[in-house]
């Protein structure tokens, strides 16, 4: 089953997580981690892999793109302008956007290198790509990979990347990380508790946020 078909079929289950006991704690912490990295960037903003629009709504993103139709309908109901498409072929003009937000979407992309290269193409020279990632070599990444191996429908479809591999793909796309923030330093699997995001990178954190700006150098990522 394609990722889009998976999220279409299980859109209700996916969206309900945000209001469940874990999502009600984790989601606000992730939003707070991302928000300062978007602040001050020129408009308009787009989210690639917008899903049901929770992050786009919370962060004031102008337009969301996703290949799955049912989640897009939920995003539209939250006031997000939506367009159906894939991150590897963004339907935006080069340099048309001030920010591209990508939250735990690289791991679901058919071609992560192409997705990041497209994100670089569509941002202005004074814009940025803002990433929210769970790295494969973090405690939370290993936890989600174990859940995927046990048959969890979403995590079994994800291909989490290590921090170094993600950074290499970002750099190959012509981007450099200018700022970073992190959150979820608590142990995965326990009942989550509220936690403040911090500036900088923390290898012990489960959710890493990067603001990547144009570097002017584009290479070919090897996968």
Image: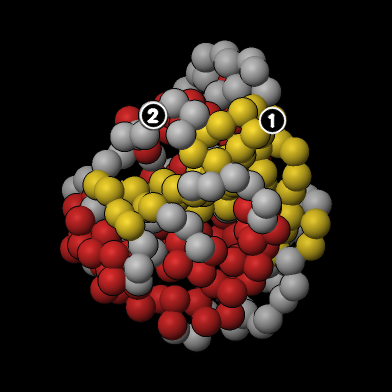
Confirm whether residue 178 shows in the render. yes
Horizontal side of 202 relative to 36 (left or right) equals right
| Residue name at image x 31 percent, y 34 percent | 91
Give the label on residue 93, or none.
2
Picture quadrant of residue 114 = top left
User: In the structure shown, which secondary structural element does the residue marked by tag 1 occupy?
Assistant: strand
Residue with the mark numbered 1: 176
| Residue 95 on image: x %, y % | 49, 29
Residue 144 placement (x, y as % from top left): 50, 59
**Which of marks 1 and 2 precedes in the sequence?**
2
Residue 146 vs residue 135: left or right? Answer: left
Give the Cα distance between marks 2 and 1: 21 Å
**Is residue 162 in sight in this rendering?**
no
- Residue 173's place in the image compared with 202, above or below, is above
Quadrant assignment, res 199? bottom right
- What's the residue at 44%, 26% (across, down)? 94
């Amino acid at each position: 089953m394609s990722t889009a078909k998976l999220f279409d079929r299980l859109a209700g289950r996916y969206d309900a997580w945000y209001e469940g006991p874990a999502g009600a704690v984790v989601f606000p912490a992730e939003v707070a981690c991302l928000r300062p990295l978007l602040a001050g960037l020129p408009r308009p903003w787009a989210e690639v892999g917008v899903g049901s629009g929770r992050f786009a709504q919370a962060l004031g993103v102008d337009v969301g793109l996703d290949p799955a139709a049912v989640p897009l309908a939920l995003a539209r109901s939250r006031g997000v302008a939506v367009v159906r498409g894939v991150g590897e072929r963004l339907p935006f003009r080069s340099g048309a956007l001030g920010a591209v937000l990508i939250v735990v979407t690289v791991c679901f992309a058919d071609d992560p290198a192409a997705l990041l290269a497209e994100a670089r193409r569509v941002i202005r020279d004074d814009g940025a790509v803002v990433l929210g990632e769970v790295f494969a070599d973090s405690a939370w990444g290993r936890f989600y990979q174990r859940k995927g191996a046990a048959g969890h429908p979403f995590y079994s479809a994800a291909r989490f990347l290590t921090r170094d591999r993600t950074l290499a793909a970002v750099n190959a796309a012509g981007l450099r990380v200018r700022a970073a923030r992190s959150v979820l330093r608590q142990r995965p699997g326990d009942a989550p508790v509220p936690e403040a995001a911090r500036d900088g990178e923390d290898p012990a954190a489960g959710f890493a946020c990067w603001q990547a700006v144009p570097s002017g150098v584009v290479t070919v990522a090897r996968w």
